[in-house]
Image (tube, rainbow, N blue to C red):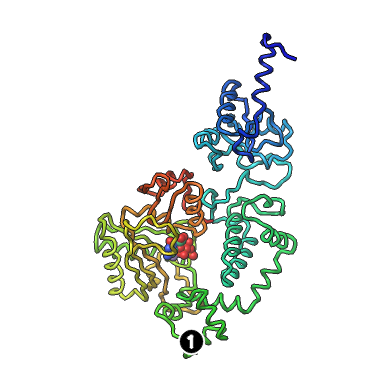
């Protein structure tokens, strides 16, 4: 029994008060914070504890295995870790050790914000007794992960890609996406998955994907994948869809008619190939060969020169896979624009016309602009944006490529090759959104849009960013502005290979 008159007892009462936090006040049941007093000091720690509790956060006074987020102002990772370890945390992988900036951001937002790399003090844990280096968090969104071209888990991601593709051929979109997501998560890991335990708590790695990983870990391959690879239907659909202009639907139609090879298709009198497919077959050998970076640069020089001859203000940007640092691509993607609003489409048409006059335009599928700011925001996602664009096949001479031979099949001495080129012309005030959309990767874009919609109540596409709460468009001069509007850490193109 305490006596209210005594200071000591009052102190004890206060301690009890701060520890007890009723369930009703806790808005975020899944997380438990612990603030490290070192560097922070006890009065600031008390203040921050009250602040967090007033906003519905559960703050523990004592560090225990219940704690999910440790927040510290002490940035000396090794000392901090030694201290935490001394406290006997059983499973350090379950606890995030975060900088105070995460706390401040969360207080500002009134809810726990997604953990970004800038929030991490201990982003990798060299300290684990167990040798599996696991990053503290893997976000469910590719736009919050860093994914370079260095894929440490190719053996798994290649298998997932086969499964995804097979689901795509069978029109099972959900499963297809599930395997693409799982592959994307594994691509972001800066280490090799060596045991199942390492991926067990990761987003998008469910029972099916884990089963495949387990089999590959045990036998070096997965039965389900082997079966697909040797399946005639899969092989045929894969062959047919390798032709420019042939999608899964057409490939399936041909397969159902009993066709199994290009010769079968070309010899079948009842099949009418459209213009794109005719070019696709004509240049199949060249187009199915990867385009090198040197070849992409050579094409950039050619198109830039043509554009500059039309208007000195013309601006050409290499985008797509090459802007993410890829050495090879299936095509070359460029954005062509000019500061003069409304002149971008005439410029694109003039460029295409010059390429034709020069005899290097082997094919062009032109899409006139249907862009209308008045029709935005568009609430459903459309596969193709509204900017003027051309899906081209260009002739590239070996002499135009610097310091390197053309990519070509053995015994091919033509001295030139055909290359697929995408050329898109957004108005300059839409440039940032177009660059962001065309830089890719597809998975990165998909998750950027989803993140905007779900986490920020915003709509993002290749044309605009729209805030549904404020009912206003958010303008941007460059990609950094868009990331900032989204409250996302800027991710360099070479880190977007999700
Ligand atoms: N893209 C788009 N609209 C299209 C076609 C493509 O917005 N009609 C975007 C895609 O989101 C993709 C990017 O352009 O992220 C590049 O597409 P693509 O050339 O197909 O892929 P790359 O990432 O460049 O890969 P590759 O090197 O194989 O060409
Ligand atoms: Mn590309
Ligand atoms: Mn492309």
Residue at left offset 41%, top offset 64%: 384
Residue at the image position 31 percent from the left and 54 percent from the top = 428
Using residue 312 as the reference point, say whether residue 246 is left or right of it.
right
Q: Name which residue lies at 63% across and 57% down.
A: 153
- The image shows residue 96, relative to residue 43, as above or below, that is below
- Residue 491 lies, in percent from the top left, at 48, 48
Front residue of this view, candidates 28 and 151? 28
Q: Is residue 164 above or below residue 184?
A: below
Task: State the residue position of label 1.
Answer: 266
Q: Residue furthest top?
A: 5
Instruction: Please tell me whether mark 1 sits on a helix, a strand or a loop.
Output: helix
Q: How many marks?
A: 1
Kindly identify the residue that appears in the image at 59 percent across and 22 percent down.
Answer: 41
What percent of the width, then of the height, locates residue 35? 62, 29
Question: Is residue 303 shown to the viewer in this render?
Answer: yes
Quadrant where ligand 3 appears = bottom left
Residue 294 visible in the snapshot: no
Residue 316 left/right relative to 66: left
């Amino acid at each position: 029994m305490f006596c209210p008159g005594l200071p000591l007892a009052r102190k004890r009462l206060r301690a009890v008060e701060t520890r007890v936090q009723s369930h009703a006040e806790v808005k975020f049941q899944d997380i438990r914070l612990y603030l490290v007093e070192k560097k922070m000091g006890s009065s600031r720690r008390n203040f921050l504890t009250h602040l967090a509790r007033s906003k519905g956060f559960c703050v523990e006074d004592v560090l225990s295995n219940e704690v999910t987020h440790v927040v510290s102002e002490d940035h000396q990772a090794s000392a901090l870790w030694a201290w935490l370890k001394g406290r006997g945390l059983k499973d350090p992988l379950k606890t995030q050790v975060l900088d105070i900036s995460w706390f401040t951001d969360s207080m500002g937002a009134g809810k726990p914000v997604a953990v970004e790399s800038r929030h991490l003090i201990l982003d990798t844990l060299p300290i684990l007794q167990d040798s599996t280096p696991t990053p503290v968090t893997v976000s469910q969104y590719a736009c919050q992960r860093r994914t370079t071209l260095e894929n440490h888990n190719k053996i798994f991601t290649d298998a997932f890609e086969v499964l995804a593709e097979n689901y795509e051929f069978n029109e099972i979109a959900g499963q297809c996406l599930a395997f693409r997501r799982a592959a994307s998560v594994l691509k972001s890991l800066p280490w090799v998955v060596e045991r199942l335990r390492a991926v067990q708590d990761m987003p998008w790695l469910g029972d099916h994907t884990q089963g495949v990983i387990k089999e590959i870990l045990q036998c070096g391959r997965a039965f389900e994948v082997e079966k697909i690879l040797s399946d005639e239907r899969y092989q045929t659909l894969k062959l047919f869809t390798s032709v420019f202009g042939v999608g899964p639907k057409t490939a399936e139609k041909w397969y159902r008619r009993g066709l199994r090879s290009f010769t079968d298709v070309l010899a079948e009198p009842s099949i009418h190939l459209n213009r794109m497919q005719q070019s696709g077959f004509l240049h199949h050998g060249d187009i199915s060969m990867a385009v090198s970076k040197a070849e992409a640069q050579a094409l950039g020089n050619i198109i830039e020169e043509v554009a500059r001859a039309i208007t000195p203000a013309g601006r050409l940007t290499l985008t797509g896979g090459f802007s993410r640092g890829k050495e090879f691509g299936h095509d070359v993607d460029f954005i062509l624009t000019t500061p003069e609003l409304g002149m971008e489409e005439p410029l694109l048409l003039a460029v295409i016309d010059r390429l034709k006059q020069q005899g290097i335009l082997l094919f062009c599928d032109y899409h006139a602009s249907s862009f209308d700011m008045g029709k935005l925001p568009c609430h459903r996602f459309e596969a193709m944006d509204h900017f003027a664009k051309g899906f081209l096949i260009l002739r590239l001479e070996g002499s135009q490529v610097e310091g390197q031979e053309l990519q070509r099949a053995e015994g091919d001495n033509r001295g030139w090759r055909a290359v697929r080129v995408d050329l898109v012309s957004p108005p300059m005030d839409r440039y940032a959104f177009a660059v962001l959309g065309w830089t890719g990767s597809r998975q990165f874009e998909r998750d950027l849009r989803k993140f905007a919609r779900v986490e920020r109540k915003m709509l993002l596409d290749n044309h605009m960013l729209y805030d549904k709460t404020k009912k206003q468009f958010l303008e941007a001069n460059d990609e950094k502005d868009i990331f900032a509007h989204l409250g996302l850490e800027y991710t360099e193109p070479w880190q977007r290979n999700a």
